[in-house]
Image: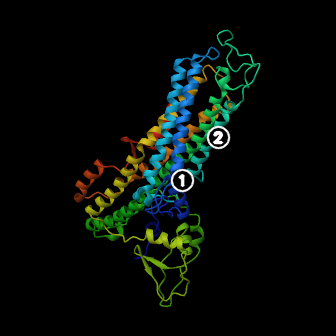
Amino acid sequence: METTREEILSSIKGKTKSAKKIPFWLWIIIAKALGIKLHPNEKPIISAVLHILTFGSAAALFSTNALISGYNVMSKHTKEDILDGTVSVMVMLFFCGLGVYSHRLAYRLFVHPKFLDMLRLHSKTIMKLNSALVIFIVLSSFVAVLNLATINNTYNHVANVTLVNPDIDPKPGPQPNDTNINPCQRVEVDVAICKIYWASQVLFSLHFLVWNLLVAVVLVSVARTQTINIRKFLRELEQDAILLDRQLQATYSNQMATSFDNLKNFVWTDDDHIADVFDESRKPPEQENGTQEPIRASGSAASFNDLQLDLGEQVDNRVEVVPDRDTSTFQQLSSAIEEAEQATNPHIMTEQEIMHKYWKISMNVRLASVALQRWMSSIVAMIVTFSAIRMVYWLSHSPTWYGVYMFISPLLLLPFLASSYAEVNYEGVKVIQSILPTEKRVQLFQYLYGHPIQMTVYGHAISYGTIGENNRQLK
């Protein structure tokens, strides 16, 4: 029986090949920074120094911010009240706490054997750009603008400056006679406090960037690995449905001509049929015995098979290696790995086999959800809180370019991080829909519906719909 083009192509679209693991040199750098021992007698000196710098700069930043906020509340030269000072202290506590927690979380993630196995050099792309790279650019630019916006904390004490009392002259915005002075001088306190504040902010923000970036890379990489595993399972379910559909059709009717209502006809594929115009003009060559060779797939599938240098022919959905072929059998290592991963033996799966593979995927997804849910909820809460405070601040102050950027850039992180969750959940929903129902699989569906494949944050599943709804609420 000839293999049709619809049987060669799969309706499962998207990447299904696992990328390489992180290189050894990169793993050495991460292990040294996080304090992961590569040898039993190794002393984590570098990680101990980084830990002290992270925790010390966080403590110095919080203490100096609390001291400056207190002087701002008590000073007669500022308009801040107790509520403003309390909010400033709370936001800084949140900021410092998240940086310290992400440091410890990064260690726990990279020392976990399952996360190391799922951590690969791949992630979801955004406009052909790696999402991990986009997150790095957004997060690093936010840190740079934050430190640049508070550069006035490094100014020295300026003599002969007249400080304006806002109760006497309540004109909003900076006053012409004290725009270029240190904020500590405005509240009549030693400018060394503001200098320590800015230095600790720069140091801690760099550590905050590194530790949170490591966690974000784990999130996008592990989520992508989960998506690829689900797609591989979907391909197996697709083959199971095709074979089972043929079997059921054969039992319903004795006319095999009417039993080829292929399941591919119910799926939309992204394939391009432009190349079929050129293939129609070419007839398949005849062999010496007068028979015709099997028709090859056209379009993208044909070009892909040609790149494999004719290693085999597709016959009845099986790859039959042709011996004594004069063609070259050379393959690149990446192509060989991809073929090995995608090589499956199409068969009708038993209920136990489906449940076992489904359970393994579900457990991997649950592990990632539990490990990352506290970090994800914390960073979402921090971004939302910071953005809300910035909007309220603009009600009585004129916005600046750096203020607008610090308002926009954190909001950009939300869809980038949430899309990793949404992609896994989007593919997970397809699993139950891809199983061809039979009378024996009734109890199977009862189990599957009770345990959906979902990445959650404290039980809340993130989908593309919730991302759009949250964006509308923020607007």
Residue position marked by numbered label 1 in the rendering: 46
Q: Secondary structure at mark 1?
A: helix
Determine crowd level at label 1: few under 14, some 14-19, many 20+ residues with C-alpha closer than 10 A: few
The location of residue 371, given as percent across then percent down, is: 40, 48
User: Given the image, on which type of amino acid does mark 2 rest?
Assistant: Ala
Quadrant in which residue 205 is drawn: top right
Question: What residue do we see at 53% from left, 64% from top?
Answer: 24
The location of residue 388, given as percent across then percent down, is: 53, 28
Disc number for residue 417: none
Determine crowd level at label 2: few under 14, some 14-19, many 20+ residues with C-alpha closer than 10 A: some
Residues at circles 1 and 2 in contact by the CB criterion of under 8 Å? no
Between the C-alphas of marks 1 and 2, the distance is 25 Å
Mark before the other along the chain sequence, 1 or 2 = 1
User: Given the image, on which type of amino acid does mark 1 rest?
Assistant: Ile
Position of 466 compared to 280: left or right? left
Q: Nearer the viewer, residue 454 or 146?
A: 146
Question: Is any atom of residue 471 visible in this view?
Answer: no
Residue position marked by numbered label 2 in the rendering: 144
Above or below residue 214? Residue 302 is below
